[in-house]
Image (cartoon, coloured by chain):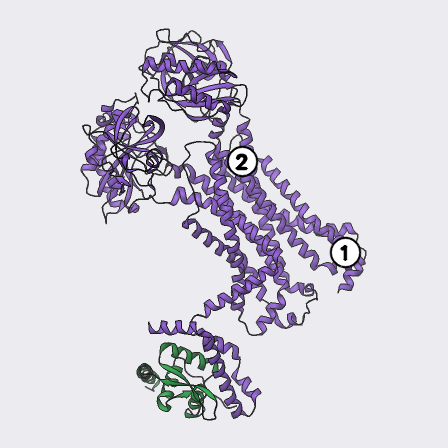
Chain colours: A purple, B green
Amino acid sequence: MRELWRKLRWLAEREQFDRELEEEMRHHLALKAEEQGSLTVANRQFGNVTLWKEKSRAMWTWTFWEQLGQDIRYGWRTMNANRLFTSMAVISLALGIGANTAIYSFVDAIMLRALPVRHAEQLAIVNWRAKGGISAVVDSHSGSNYREPGGSTTSPDYPYPAFESLRDHNQVFSNLFGYAGAGRLNLMVDGQAELGEGEYVTGGYFAGLGVRPALGRLIGPEDDKPVAAPVVTITYGLWQRRFAGKDEALGKTILINGKPFTVAGVSPAEFFGVEPQSAPQVFIPVHQLGLVDLNPHHSVESRFTDGHFYWLDIMGRLKPGVSLAQAQTEMAARFQQWALSTVRNDKDRQTLPALWLQEGGSGVDSLRRQYSKPLYILMTMVALILLIACANIANLLLARSAARRREMAVRLSLGAGRLRVIRQLLTESILLALCGGALGIVVAALGIRALTLLLANHQDDFTLGAQVDWHVLLFTFLVAVATGFLFGLAPAIQATRVDVTPALKETRASNPHARQRRFGMRFGLSHLLVVAQIATSLLLVAAAGLFVRTLVNLNAVDVGFNRENILLFSLDGAQAGYKERALKEFYAELQQRFRSLPGVRGATMSQMPLVSNSWDSTDVKIPGVSKVDGKEPFTAYMQIGPQFFETMQIPILLGRPIAQRDRQGAQAAAVVNQVFAQKYFPGVSPVGRHFGFGGKAEDTEIVGVARTPRYDSLKDEIPPVVYLSYLQAGESLPLRGMYFEIRTGGDPLALANTVRKIVHEVGPRVPVADVTTQARRIDQTIVQERTFADLCTCFGALALAMACVGLYGTMAYAVTRRTSEIGIRMALGAARGQIVWMVMREVLAMAGVGLLIGSAAAWQTTAFLKSFLFGLKPDDPLTLGAAAAILILCAFLAGYAPARRASRVEPMIALRHE
Amino acid sequence: MEERSEIPPGTLYMLILKTLARLGAMHGYGIAQHIQQISGDVLQVEEGSLYPALQRMLIKGWVVGEWQQSENNRRARFYKLTPEGRKQLGRELREFEKVMAAIGRVIQPA
């Protein structure tokens, strides 16, 4: 303690201490000189006064920091002295580090961030896994499931009875709770309707997550009973937006899908549920599900009693000291016991789901699954770009170290240790990298904004937010320091490997090429760096080519209808309380009003937009058809309004389209697509034939065949599709929300406000949502491909530019170095063309080796991209060939300028220069 | 120049402390001279080790430095043992004797 105090005092008065040390040593020298009778001898014996002083000062341990300060000041001056070099290095570093930071911030937001709850590490997601496809005990499933690489299926959804059994009989969880998405709900606050996501939660949800209310109280076990008064927890966002953040919100009644709920409390601002990408506005006790749920496929009662209906997601908080493996052992046994009690036959028994636990600290991982591979690929790409930037700067530093040879020689001859000089050079590089990193944060902030826009692509409900927080800043700092080491170390070692005496004899003006042989290794190193840059650039350019061609292929896909000039929006009358006949009339009136608007060429509606990744399918009964390709006949379907085929401009090949006359009471009519016709009625006309929909009697008549438009996606195979009249919706296929399509003469979005006004007039409680155009909606389904194509084009161009600068710099330096050699050659009769060829040969050799390595690497690695490509193979020879050609061309251009300059060397001047 | 031996590593502090204990306050040159003379010119203290060692001992609080007039009317920093330094000398001596005895046992003819 006292020691530290003395050190601090030393620091405060170190100039005095320095003077004292100096005086003390002088005194010593003087006494010694008297003894020896000669100051010179004394001096020689005493040795390096400055070094002893340094060593004595080092005892106070502040030296490291003092020297760092000196080095930084010196580095700053060096950077200032070479503005061009500094700005080039800082800009390329800023681009490289910025790109890394931007992508990392998404990685951080999606993959790494913990839930904003207490002790998130204690949370566990309760999954089950069934071998091969879905388990036979699962009659119906609502929620998510995904295929694992091994072919088994994993899902976090359970039947309610299973949840009750697990919750009430376990020793490992302090709290086991469930939740399920309620989808988009109609929320009416103070007579104003809006749409918002809802979440059904069990009574233990908030307590289990360890969330504290921002206001009032959160839903607890006492609320989660069928008989309890309906209460709701609203989110901080909704509270601020609709209640202006006032306390009066407590006890207010809001209508959810038309049913009154009392606001009991507000969840905290940072809480977003357990899925990082979702943004529920209201949390509803799961037992109040009957009030809100309009899902006709399952009765509310069956939700809580049916052991074969899997729908409730389960999470739990482990008791302190209980490990995940311990908990899994106990829970898996319990669930197996429960599941066995629901087994009906051997098939059920064989495919019984098995429970397994997963760490839940970062929330549910559907987003991670979706984005982990793309992010991994992007992260690799930006890392490669940073490596190219490093190679570039290392090359520049190597060239500069030649210019600083004298400085290094002076330092070393004055007794500076080699490590000390390397340290100083590294401080310079890291300082450079930190400047790059600081500017990189600006680049990253812009990049994050651009990337968010790119990913959101006009979706209103895009909630994924990445930002520059301290995690990201720390990442940037570490990357910058590592980068500084990476590009600074080799040149620093190289620079200090100076043979002092000849270097000192060099005059400033003398040409360093005289010692070129001794520096053979440097040219080896810088050539190696250029080759690596070219190889890496080829990878990035090839990847960009693959993604761009994928996008081109996707855009060239014939969707089978006219996607231009269509306004698209959704509304849900069912949630606002319209029922059956009234609902159909509501939709019909809207269609009528829209059609009569000026500038509107046609208006129709459909259950979902075309090509929007939405999908509904069911099995069908077709007389005479039992199995096709070993599968029960099935079909995708879509409820549509009259004028659908006319408005979308889908040709009807046989029969007639769905029309106004296909209404309740008339013969049930359907239009099928060509795939349906060819699959189930090969070689015959299906018009006039009947089939049974959803396992019902065969009472639906096929009235027409449409030329196959794309159904749900641009990429996937088109399934058989049945188009049904919404006017004939009933028990088996009830009517819900609808999307309206309005074909316009001019800009469709110009109509948006008129449409809102009309909807408000016809049904004031029905909010309009998802206003966009058909073309944009299709675009949203290929947002990942578009993002990849855009980003990779940028990355590829950046890599190419850096590689060219590197190549140019290396060659320009080599030409300067060889000026006199070239002069001699020319004096001896070499033609200019020969000189150009001599330089170009070197350029092309480097490019060739780089391309060879790059192609081999591309061959090996592009297979990873397979799942991201459409319409071409990862080793597409055309793309790889084009990428190689682009690189050769760029190398040629970058190399030609120095080659030309070499050929302009005047032999006399070059020789006199010597 | 006659042959001089290196000061065994780790013993410089002990030698300095002992010198100060014997002579009272003394400046750096004096300490070096004293060690050299007493050891019969066998041990020579390098300036490159002496001054860092003195600084280290200042930090540790074993010695304090004081500026005084030296014998020939020059200003010099005189180092003086502190009570802490005296204790340290005791510790170092005991340790040294222990090691010496041990070495003696090892090298003594069987």
Question: Please, what is the three-letter code of the amino acid marked with disc 2?
Answer: Phe
Question: Please, what is the three-letter code of the amino acid marked with disc 1?
Answer: Val
Where does the image place residue A592, in percent across and percent down from the top left? 44, 13
Q: Is residue B18 positioned above or below A878 on the image?
A: below
Q: In which quarter of the image is the N terminus of chain A?
A: bottom left
Q: What element carries label 2?
A: helix
Residue behind mark 2:
A547
Residue behind mark 1:
A905
Earlier-in-chain disc, 2 versus 1: 2
Where does the image place residue A41, in percent across and percent down from the top left? 56, 88
Q: In which quarter of the image is the C terminus of chain A?
A: bottom right
Crowd around label 2: few <14 · some 14–19 · many ≥20 (10 Å): many
Q: Is residue A387 positioned above or below A611 on the image?
A: below
Where does the image place residue A789, in percent across and percent down from the top left? 53, 36
Residue A65 visible from this viewpoint? yes
Does residue A618 appear left or right of residue A77 in this picture? left
